[in-house]
Image (cartoon, rainbow, N blue to C red):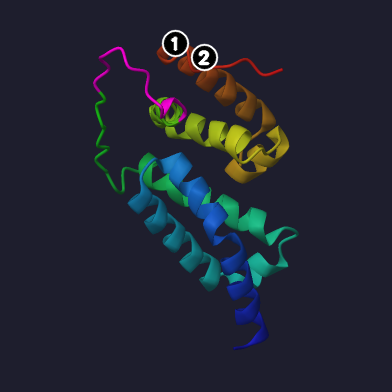
Amino acid sequence: MQPTEQEFAELFRASWARLYRLAFAVSGDRGAAEDDLQNAFAKVYSNWARVRRADHPEAYVRRMVLNEVLGGRRNGFLKRERPHLVVERGGSVASPEAGVVERDAIWTAVRALPSRQRAVVVLRYYEDLSEAEIADALGCSRGTVKSQASAAIAALRRTAPDLVREEP
């Protein structure tokens, strides 16, 4: 293996799991997340000379992954079904899986957001990125990040008011 291929392989191994979780959180579909991540890494490999010269190659790849996830939906390239599991709420017995149910409800509400707002929410609250890092990852201004985050939180407050907690 040549040194450049070894560098690519190391980046791939070090970042695949984290970027898969990001792609899944933004897309809401495991299969689509894997497809988008594979497509992004194919592009990374074919443009490896440029990617490896970047100041932060993993941030560069993160942006490529987000472009892949958001681009497919924006252009309507792949129209995917989004099956929803309907949970009947009934009975008086408290569920021991209340935490799991709450997390599922949160992700269901987040997946209902438009893709750009969903990406901002995932990058901010799941990946814990700053506004500047999110703006860089999405290729937009910090103001756009702020407005998308504000719109997303407002939408979540309307659709799932019991799930939204105020930040300290």
Pick the quarter of the image with the N terminus: bottom right
Disc 2 marks which residue? 154
Name which residue lies at 26% across and 32% down. 84
Secondary structure under tag 2 reads helix
Disc 1 marks which residue? 158
Q: Quadrant of residue 145?
A: top right
Q: x, y (%) of residue 18?
A: 56, 53
Name which residue lies at 53% across and 17% down. 164
Disc 2 from disc 1: Cα separation: 6 Å
Name which residue lies at 31% across and 48% down. 77
Q: Do residues under tags 2 and 1 come within 8 Å of each other at their CB atoms? A: yes
Amino acid type of the residue that numbered disc 2 sits on in the rendered structure: Ala
Callout 2 crowding tier (Cα within 10 Å): few <14, some 14–19, many ≥20: some
Q: Is residue 103 above or below residue 39?
A: above
Q: Residue furthest right?
A: 55
Q: Which residues are magenta?
A: 88-99
Q: Quadrant of residue 64?
A: bottom right
Given residues 146 and 88, the one toward you in this image is: 88
Given residues 62 and 109, the one toward you in this image is: 109
Q: Is residue 132 magenta?
A: no
Amino acid type of the residue that numbered disc 1 sits on in the rendered structure: Arg
Left or right of residue 129: residue 21: left
Callout 1 crowding tier (Cα within 10 Å): few <14, some 14–19, many ≥20: few
